Image (spheres, helix red, strand yellow):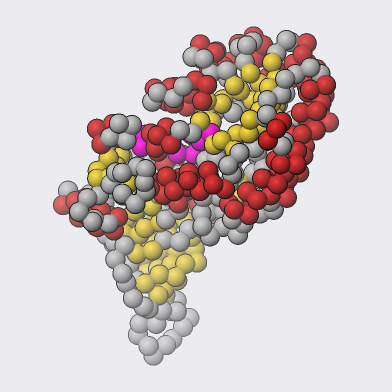
């Protein structure tokens, strides 16, 4: 029911249709309407497989999906069907999760700097678990939600992560004693510790140290009389198969550290807040080349007429920095931008610069990429584009999103596609 076509705008891939057939049809359909709207296609099977992989690889850790990463309705409905919890970072995200039927006790309000009105909204709607990392936040919570179940977020060493968060969030270990003392004075209930080791962590030992630090905070809190029952190991787990440190490698270190510092008989519940892990690889973007310029290099005089080295191609896509591709521009060391042609094309390849559609010259997606010659109206496909893309689109962007399930993944015996979306204007 949760994933029924009526609820999710899902189109079923039946009669052996493949995702490539689906993309072909969609492009043809757009062409017949004289449209070149960019769109996403998402493979929900991929998310189901990720979940099964999570359950076998990190069996002690319950995932609370970080909604901020991609809150497409079909994604959320899939996560609900899989039975995960949810990490919400704002009133709007809590509202969305509740509107889809998520129980309030399956939500952690995992933002350490919350607006008063958002905390009050959480209280009114029974969302009690929330993070904090400062005295000011404690005071705010004591006014707005005095019965909240609090999780102290600590800063950890994230120097080996591509996307770092501990400079903005997390209490230093040296301040924990005072902070917990203040929570006691305010008669607040602290139940656990959280951290986020940063996204794209290349050094698994960072998790071990973070878990050891969390143990230290548990010991301090227990001495102060708190009943500590929850450890939240955050997000940051890669969802790509080509990242230099695999999910399995990181998990092995986490499992070892959990057994050492929080053995099963300690009765501490372990949760995590994965975002990109679930959605990154399930989404593919199809964007259209709306304009092209060929830049000839006058300095080279070759006898070969079609010399791939005497020219640079400039392509202008209808999605970019101000559309759904800001992560590619902002975090190039994590997000690989490796577009490929929708239709198979052969040599020669040309150095290509790919721009987004706006008038801003920072709206550049890559400036050293080799592609066969493409033409206005051709389509480029970009894999691994499910994380912080659709969810960060500006108002200018109206991205379409097609989501499909095949019957590969039991126990979800569906075979369908979802089409959500908008086009980008500029
Ligand atoms: C508090 C918190 N939890 C979880 C996440 C999800 O991180 P990721 O998508 O890298 O798993 C983030 C991302 O910014 C975050 O800030």
Q: Check residue 27 for magenta coloring.
A: no
Q: Is residue 98 left or right of residue 15?
A: right
Q: Check residue 69 for magenta coloring.
A: yes
Which residue is depicted at the point 68% across and 25% down? 229
Q: Position of residue 304 (x, y in %)?
A: 37, 88
Towards the viewer: 261 or 72: 261
Residue 172 makes an appearance in the image: no
List the single residue furthest toward the bottom: 303
Q: Position of residue 220 (x, y in %)?
A: 82, 26
Q: Which quadrant of the figure contains the N terminus?
A: top left
Q: Position of residue 180 (x, y in %)?
A: 77, 20
Towards the viewer: 48 or 312: 48
Q: Position of residue 419 (x, y in %)?
A: 28, 42
Towards the viewer: 342 or 200: 200
**The quarter of the displayed image where residue 263 is located:** top right
**The quarter of the displayed image where residue 147 is located:** top right
Numbered-mark total: 0
- The boundaries of the magenta stretch are 64-74
Which residue is depicted at the point 74% across and 16% down? 183
Q: Which quadrant of the figure contains the C terminus?
A: top left
List the single residue furthest toward the front: 265
Q: Is residue 157 left or right of residue 334?
A: right
Residue 397 makes an appearance in the image: yes
Which residue is depicted at the point 48% across and 58% down? 337
**The quarter of the displayed image where residue 245 is located:** bottom right
Which residue is depicted at the point 49% across and 63% down? 367
Towards the viewer: 207 or 338: 207
List the single residue furthest toward the left: 32
């Amino acid at each position: 029911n949760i994933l029924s076509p009526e609820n999710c705008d899902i189109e079923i891939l039946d009669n052996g249709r493949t995702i490539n057939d689906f993309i072909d049809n969609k492009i043809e359909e757009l062409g017949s309407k004289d449209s070149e709207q960019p769109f996403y296609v998402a493979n929900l099977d991929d998310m189901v497989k990720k979940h099964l992989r999570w359950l076998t690889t990190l069996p002690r850790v319950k995932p609370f999906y970080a909604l901020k990463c991609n809150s497409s309705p079909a994604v959320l409905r899939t996560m609900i069907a899989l039975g995960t919890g949810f990490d919400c970072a704002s009133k709007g995200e809590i509202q969305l999760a509740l509107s889809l039927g998520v129980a309030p006790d399956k939500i952690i309000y995992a933002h350490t700097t919350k607006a008063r009105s958002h905390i009050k909204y959480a209280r009114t709607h029974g969302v009690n678990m929330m993070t904090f990392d400062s005295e000011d936040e404690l005071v705010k919570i004591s006014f707005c939600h005095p019965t909240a179940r609090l999780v102290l977020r600590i800063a950890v060493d994230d120097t080996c992560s591509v996307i770092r968060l501990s400079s903005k969030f997390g209490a230093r270990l040296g301040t924990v004693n005072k902070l917990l003392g203040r929570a006691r004075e305010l008669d607040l209930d602290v139940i656990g510790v959280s951290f986020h080791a940063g996204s794209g962590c290349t050094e698994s030992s960072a998790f071990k140290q973070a878990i050891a630090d969390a143990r230290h905070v548990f010991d301090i809190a227990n001495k102060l009389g708190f009943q500590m029952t929850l450890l939240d190991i955050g997000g940051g787990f890669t969802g790509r198969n080509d990242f230099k440190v695999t999910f399995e490698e990181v998990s092995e270190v986490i499992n070892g550290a959990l057994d050492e510092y929080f053995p099963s008989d300690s009765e501490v519940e372990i949760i995590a807040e994965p975002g990109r892990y679930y959605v990154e690889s399930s989404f593919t973007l199809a964007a259209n080349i709306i304009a092209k310029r060929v830049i000839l290099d006058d300095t080279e005089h070759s006898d070969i007429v079609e010399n791939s080295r005497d020219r640079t191609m400039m392509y202008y896509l209808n999605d970019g920095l101000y559309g759904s591709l800001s992560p590619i521009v902002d975090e190039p060391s994590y997000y690989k931008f490796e577009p490929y042609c929708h239709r198979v094309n052969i040599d020669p390849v040309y150095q290509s610069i790919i721009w987004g559609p706006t008038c801003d010259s920072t709206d550049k997606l890559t400036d050293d990429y080799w592609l066969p010659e493409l033409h206005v109206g051709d389509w480029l496909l970009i894999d691994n584009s499910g994380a912080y893309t659709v969810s960060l689109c500006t108002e200018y962007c109206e991205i379409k999103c097609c989501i499909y399930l095949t019957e590969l993944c039991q126990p979800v015996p569906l075979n369908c596609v979802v089409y959500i979306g908008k086009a980008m204007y500029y």
